[in-house]
Amino acid sequence: MSNDNESAFGDVIFSYTRRQAIRDGVLVDLTPYHSIQQAWKHHFACTSTVWSIIENCGQIEDCACQLISVAAITKIREQPANSDALRFSVNLGGKTYALKLHCGPGDTAEPVLTLMLPCED
């Protein structure tokens, strides 16, 4: 390589940031919710599909977020910490949902959490 700024893979053709996904509604920022702030130290968002479940489960959004947090934290305590994704179930509005919580790099490589359905990536 002739330049320190060149990537081994060449120039970036296209990038879609987490910030853009939140602005576009593909992801919904849950970080402002009190229950999320109390349970998680990293930025926390969910897919629009999960947000639709939260909005339509018949509970206040912050209460639904608290139920999700408790279910995820309970599963974290049971599961070895050798994976970047956690699969768990939560009961919202009398219905059980399978969810996946992924920890990965954000727009500036900081750790971020994304809640999604198991079939979403």
Image: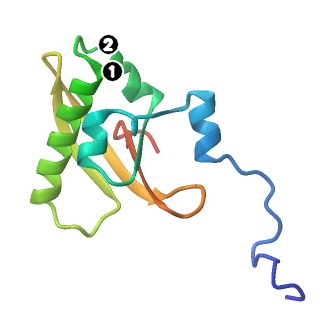
- Contact flag, marks 2 and 1 (Cβ < 8 Å): yes
Q: Locate residue 25, reporting x and y percent.
A: 56, 27
- Decide which of 87, 30 is in the foreground and name it: 30
- Give the residue type at disc 1: Ile
Q: Which residue is mark 1?
A: 53
The kind of residue on which mark 2 rests is Asn
The residue carrying pointer 2 sits among few (fewer than 14), some (14 to 19) or many (20 or more) residues within 10 Å by Cα, namely few
| 102 shown above or below 95 | below
Residue with the most extreme bottom position:
2
Question: In the drawing, does residue 24 fall left or right of residue 84?
Answer: right
Q: Residue 34: which quarter of the image?
A: top left
Q: CA distance from mark 2 to mark 1?
A: 5 Å
As drawn, 56 above or below 74: above
Residue 62 in the image: above or below residue 29: above
Residue 53 occupies quadrant: top left
Callout count: 2
Q: Secondary structure at mark 2?
A: helix
- Residue at which label 2 appears: 56
Q: State the image coordinates of residue 10 (x, y, percent, origin top left).
A: 81, 71
Q: Say how the picture is coloured.
A: rainbow
x and y, in percent, of residue 109 in the image: 55, 64
Quadrant into which the N terminus falls: bottom right
Q: Which mark is residue 73?
A: none
Q: Residue furthest right?
A: 2
Q: Residue at x 25, y 15 (%)?
A: 57
Residue at position x 59%, y 61% from top?
108
Residue 41, image quadrant: bottom left
Look at the picture and state if 119 lies above or below 96: below
Label 1: how many Cα within 10 Å (few below 14, some 14–19, many 20+)? some
